[in-house]
Amino acid sequence: MMQNDVVVIGGGISGLSLAFYCVKAGMKTTMLEKNDTIGGSFASPHYNANGKKFWLELGAHTCYSSYQNLLDIVEACGIKDKIIPRAKVPFSLFIDGKVKSIVSQLNILELLSSAPNIFKLKKEGQSVKSYYSKIVGEKNYREVISHFFNAVPSQLTDDFPADMMFKSREKRKDVLKNYTFKEGLQSVARAISAQSGLNVFTSQEVTSIKYVDDLYEIRTANGGEYSAKTLVLATPSMVTSKLLRDIKPEISSHLGQLKAADVDSLGVIVRKENISLKPVAALISPNDVFFSVVSRDTVPDDNYRGFVFHFKPGLDDKTKRTRVTEVLGVSFSKIEHTFSKVNTVPSLRLGHHQWLEKTNILLKKEKSLLLTGNYFGGMAIEDCVSRSRSEFDRMKG
Ligand SMILES: Cc1cc2nc3c(=O)[nH]c(=O)nc-3n(C[C@H](O)[C@H](O)[C@H](O)COP(=O)(O)OP(=O)(O)OC[C@H]3O[C@@H](n4cnc5c(N)ncnc54)[C@H](O)[C@@H]3O)c2cc1C
């Protein structure tokens, strides 16, 4: 059995950032990832066309100057010079087969009469629907704005806690307000996984964990066996809950209270000359079979354009392909390459802060068990890295 100081289960940004802190502290660290690549919702696969690479984001696509913990890691990995700006192209609506601006769909009178509420109302204790329908007006919220909110975690967000949707954080002045990386966000994942002292094993789905003589024994579906003094679980909440069922039943059942949604994403790559759609950052189509179509037009390429459709779960291939061709106005034969991925995102609800407080109380006596992920302080990349940072500090403190 391979012995380690730390085993990290899950190779998304939560697991990667915590692994980064551990290796920097000189701990022998192993990461186990179920998929054949690391990155999780932070994955930018490449299409190789005539010796040139074209990447596409199948999950997260934008980082901000307020992502201070992430930026610290980016700097420590020596890839700050790989940060690039995103082209200013619009987020638009797709209604009745036509691309429309957001402003054209808003009731401006309702907006102007509601907007002053922003100075009076507090987000704390309010759902996204109750808070934002007072800020933009009920009709504007229902017909336009709610669809943009739903596009963020690719699910209905009416009941999300308003203060967990968009957070204001201190910004760094020396970094672009919003940005990506030369080869997509996965550049960060690759840079972390290349750190010396970190062993990364992909295609390793962890199926069981035992705790024997102060050591965690971790087994994977294909027969891998690892042991560690400290265990990091950086998997979606229901996976973490399942893996902890036998060794930490109370924590497992507490995690089991959370809900999550699967996002079924289909990325398509088209030669530029085959598509006439004007450049967009994303298309949102109210009440459609997808939550959003995120485009690569934010980092234009000489030859190709790419679009990722974040579909509602449970659709068959034919339905998805048909909608892709209708929205892009190209036949499927003109699509040169496709990528698919299913990501998991938390379905946060009011009361999450109390849930989190209880989680941290339960973990107080568990110095060798660290839990991170996108279901603690929020689902943005910076929330994940901040959670990893505070779990690392808890272990050290
Ligand atoms: C479509 C989409 C767009 C987004 N856009 C943005 C954005 O622009 N900006 C932003 O800040 N945030 C964005 N987010 C949110 C952010 O990307 C995610 O919350 C974050 O990347 C999640 O990271 P994570 O490591 O917690 O989870 P994940 O990325 O889900 O990683 C968990 C990993 O655990 C692995 N795993 C699961 N089970 C096992 C097992 N049994 N054994 C081993 N490994 C296992 C999974 O394969 C996965 O790789 C977006 C999310 C999505 C889905």
Image: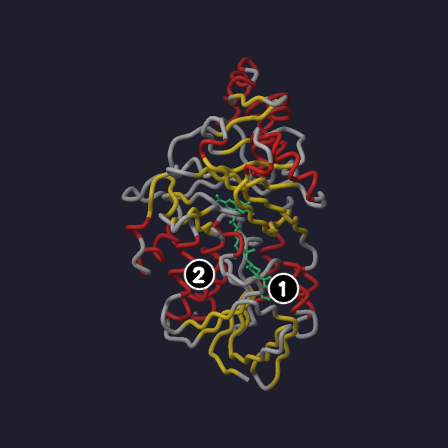
Question: In whole angstroms, how far apart are the C-alphas of marks 2 and 1?
Answer: 17 Å
Instruction: Report the quarter where the C terminus lies.
Output: bottom left
Going by the picture, which residue comes out furthest to the top?
A: 109
Task: Check the image and report above or below for 148 versus 45.
Answer: above
Image location of residue 155, percent across then percent down: 64, 41
Residue shown at 40%/62% (left/top)? 192
Instruction: Report the quarter where the N terminus lies.
Output: bottom right
Disc 1, SS: helix
Q: Which residue is mark 1?
A: 240
Residue shown at 60%/37% (left/top)? 332
Instruction: Kindly identify which numbered label has been placed on residue 17.
Output: 2
Residue shown at 55%/49% (left/top)? 339
Q: On the rendering, which quadrant does ligand 1 occupy?
A: bottom right
Q: How many C-alpha atoms fall within 10 Å of the one at disc 1: few (<14), some, or many (≥20)?
A: many
Q: Residue 272, located in which quarter of the rendered image? A: top left
The residue at label 1 has a CB less than 8 Å from ligand 1: no
Q: Nearer the viewer, residue 367 or 1?
A: 1
Image location of residue 335, percent across then percent down: 55, 39
Q: Nearer the viewer, residue 190 or 104?
A: 190
The residue at label 2 has a CB less than 8 Å from ligand 1: no
Q: Residue 153, located in which quarter of the rendered image? A: top right
**Type of residue at label 2?**
Ser
**Type of residue at label 1?**
Thr
Instruction: Kindly identify which numbered label has been placed on residue 385.
Output: none
Image location of residue 200, percent across then percent down: 47, 70
Say which label, 2 or 1, has the lower sequence index. Answer: 2
Going by the picture, which residue comes out furthest to the bottom?
A: 213
Asked if labels 1 and 2 touch by Cβ distance under 8 angstroms, the answer is no
